[in-house]
Amino acid sequence: VLFRSKREKDQIMGERIVLYPAPGMGHMVPLIELGKRLVTNRPSLSITVITSTLPFDYNSAAHSAYIAAVSAAFPSITFHALPTLSTLRPLSTYPHTEDILFELIPRNNPNLRQILNSLSPISAFIIDFFCTSAIEVGRSLNIPTYFFFISGASALALFLNFPIIDRTTSQGFRDSGIEFNIPGLPPIPATALPPSMLDRGETYREFVNVGAQMANSDGVIVNSFEGFEPRAVRVLDEGVCVPKGFRTPPVYCVGPLISVVDSGGSGGGERHESLSWLDSQPSRSVVFVCFGSSALFTKEHLAEIAHGLERSGQRFLWVVKDPPPLDDISKRFTKPPIADLDKVLPAGFLDRTKGRGFVIKSWVPQTAILAHEAVGAFVTHCGWNSTLEAVCTGVPLIACPLFAEQRF
């Protein structure tokens, strides 16, 4: 339930709601799914999505196709694009993608203000946590401003505690041996934090500010649900996830919000080859191995995965991407080339596993794959969207957390 009273519902469900996702499909899709749910429940509502892209966005084709599909299916959801800004220094000097997001998004605030002014009146402004700087714009225009948290309630509980943790510690966390004890959560070793939060640098300070701004916002909307995270949801709902004297904002668990993408065929297109292959496999016999759009493994790491799949004797569907270049750190932000499987996988692997294994080197319809009768397990990086998709389709997870909040 998103609204706690009829008065609050009447206040928010006005003429227009504006959504402001961070760049990237993983941030945009869940927030637009929220928009779809809102207009489905209230057809008279108008939703405006303010989009932005990074200067190295290599998924622009998928981004454009997704927006076109949403616009066609939901005419009451419209889009405004902010200008694409350039970074202030070479990409190779940014250790983490978060550094770029926290630099570029605030610089678009003047353009954001112009768009919001042109859309007035606005009943609610819902922002991704990477867009925290936009809360100043919303407040200055007297628009009720809410955060949309694309991860789970447990991660939100930690983020709300992060400003308090910052006050009570003075050193960085990289080699500290510290554990965080937060109500509703198991003990979290500090080393499980994302790398950009381990040292008390500029990006660390940005995350401290995110937690503080969320705590004092009009509310936080979370892509999770009580049945999946009962303890974390309970302490957030009761306001006891932070020490006495600190504020817990109103929290609305509205998940699971997942996108069911057409796999081809139903719309007259060609059925994706991965699904056609799964059609020929026995029920619950296939291990699906996929680590999301951002994870890149070295050739040596790919060889270890291949070795494990081969020795397991299990049927598998594996999505493989080209290993990252080691000579130029800036190439992390460019589209990886299509993998040459004969070069990146062990010699003879494809021949030895032919028939029981299928290796894909491009995009796959993950939700449709997880919903397929033949899939019996999912080896995943534990990205929140992937986790929710697996939970909703009833597929057991084999966890291989890699980055962001995936390790806690």
Image (tube, rainbow, N blue to C red):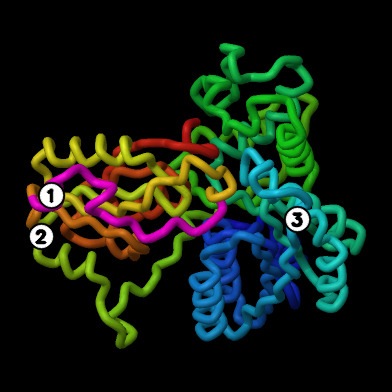
The label on residue 11 is: none
How many angstroms separate mark 1 from mark 2 (CA)?
8 Å
Residue 253 at least partly seen: no
In this rendering, would 175 be left or right of 18?
A: left
Task: Name above or below for residue 204 compared with residue 29.
Answer: above
Residue 344 forms part of the magenta stretch: yes
Q: Is residue 317 rendered to the left or right of residue 326?
A: left
Circle 2 sits in a helix, a strand or a loop, which is it?
loop
The residues tagged by marks 3 and 2 sit, at their Cα atoms, a distance apart of 46 Å
The residue carrying pointer 3 sits among few (fewer than 14), some (14 to 19) or many (20 or more) residues within 10 Å by Cα, namely many
What residue does disc 2 label? 281
Which residue position holds label 1? Answer: 315
For the point 66% across and 49% down, which residue is it? 91
- Comparing 252 with 214, the one in front is 214
**Could you tell me the amino acid type at mark 3?**
Ile
Task: Give the mark nearest the N terminus, 3 or 2.
Answer: 3
| Of 44 and 334, the residue lying toward us | 334
Q: Are marks 1 and 2 in contact (CB under 8 Å)?
A: yes
Quadrant location, the N terminus: bottom right
Task: Please report the residue visible at 76 percent of the width from the left and 34 percent of the height from the top.
Answer: 202
Q: In the orientation shown, which residue stands out farthest toward the right?
A: 140
- For the point 68% across and 25% down, the residue is 199
Please tell me whether residue 60 belongs to the stretch shown in magenta.
no
Residue 155 is at least partly visible in this image: yes
Q: Which residue is mark 3?
A: 105
Task: Tell me the distance, in whole angstroms, between the alpha carbons under discs 1 and 3.
Answer: 44 Å
